[in-house]
Image (cartoon, helix red, strand yellow):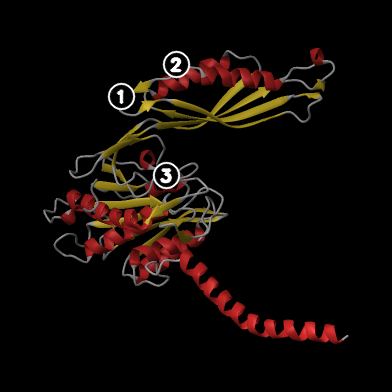
Amino acid sequence: MADARLFFRKYSEIYTVFLPLFSVFLVIYTGLIMFSSRHPGLPTDESDTLLYLHRSLISIPSVTTNEHAAAQFLQTYLTSKGWVVETQRVSSEPVRENIYAYRGSKRSTRVLFSSHIDTVPPFIQYSVHNGYIWGRGSVDAKASVAAQITAAQDLLSSSDVADEGDISLLFVVGEETDGIGMITANELGLSWETVIFGEPTELKLAVGHKGLILGDLYATGKASHSGYPELGINANYYLVEGLYKLQNLDYPYSDLLGNTTFNAGMLEGGVAANVIPASASASVAVRVAADLDGVLSQMQRAALGVPHLDINFTLSYPPVLCDYDVPGFDTVAVAYGTDIPHLEGSHKRYLYGPGSILFAHADNERISEKELRDSVEGYKKLAAAALGNKHDMASDGKGAR
């Protein structure tokens, strides 16, 4: 019994010393973890406009069709900074709206900054680590939205660069799917001399981007027991045959934009392994480098050559050529689609922005703070050139690569 009391006395003394030390260690460890996940240069208040906007937008989930909260944030913020803000209703259920903003009384301006506020799923929360800002939309395209607003406000604060009637902002919904936001924006009844579209181009001026064809394949068969396949018609077989033909078509090539590429993104067919499938379907996407009409005809003929198969085209637009006549920028051709073909008008069109498309839509979407900041100078340089201003926006070489 005495030995037991001695044992507990000994270890209670160790415990009374260990507990305070452990508590101190825990506090230090927690502080280190918090510090590693946040950089003191990335504020939660408005002391740094660019980073505040970027963080705020990423922190608001805005997967396509759920953009309302992000639009409300922009409306509140821009109004507080002296912008006249119009919300353009795109749909009522769910509530979706575009944001159009300008300064003063001149609704129509010479230059328009434009990007989109919707993202692909799933939502990924904002974080900072390993020297990068992470989160859904950190690249595509909330980096462009934050940088364009910052650039516009910088330019308008300097009367020798831009004045009322020179610059406006348009941030739309639905770019990631059907472009309904930009299509609806045509109803604003406005035109511009120059539109600067914000998408991830790694701070390079895009010379253009591929066109797009979206389509659905439908195969119709007849169900039966798999033990008696001769009594049924296997829809999966005809769907696979159609996909094989579409994949192996001799699609056109462009010296500027490269190859036309085909992707079968979604396939569905059948109900069980022991049932001959009565129906099957696939959704496909073609990135068109040249000759949109020719590619549509190729695909139509290929589908018609397969029994029990139909094809329905849901969206198409031709390759897009952009302006890239502002010196000091490297150039690039991109393979993704944008809202550029959905905005009507004879305006010049520039495609530029921070971040890499290789991180967009991925679970590791991220951007460096430096590239985000450099894009502000790039946007300012493009707008100043569009306005014909001789002011040197490229001092220190910022925004150029």
Q: Which residue appears farthest toward the right when viewing the image?
A: 1
Mark 3 sits on what residue? Answer: 183
**Drawn side of residue 290 relative to residue 69, left or right:** left
Position of the N terminus, as image quadrant, is bottom right
> Which amino acid type is shown beneath numbered disc 2?
Asp
Crowding around mark 2 (Cα neighbors within 10 Å: few <14, some 14 to 19, many 20+) is few
- Disc 1 from disc 3: Cα separation: 30 Å
Disc sitting over residue 208 in the figure: none
Residue 400 visible = yes
> Which amino acid type is shown beneath numbered disc 1?
Asp
> Which amino acid type is shown beneath numbered disc 3?
Ile
Position of the C terminus, as image quadrant, is top left
147 up-or-down from 229: above or below: below
Q: Earlier in the sequence, mark 1 or mark 2?
A: 2
- Disc 1 from disc 2: Cα separation: 16 Å
Task: Give the structural element (helix, strand or loop) at label 2.
Answer: loop
Point 57% across, 19% down: residue: 244
Instruction: Residue 171: name its quadrant.
Output: bottom left
- Circles 1, 2 touching at the beta carbon (< 8 Å): no
Mark 1 sits on what residue? Answer: 255
150 up-or-down from 313: above or below: below
Mark 2 sits on what residue? Answer: 250
109 up-or-down from 242: above or below: below
Q: Percent position (x, y) of residue 312?
A: 56, 27
Q: Earlier in the sequence, mark 2 or mark 3?
A: 3
Q: Percent position (x, y) of residue 5?
A: 82, 86
Instruction: Residue 46: name its quadrant.
Output: bottom left
Q: Earlier in the sequence, mark 1 or mark 3?
A: 3
Q: Percent position (x, y) of residue 340?
A: 36, 41
Residue 393 visible = no
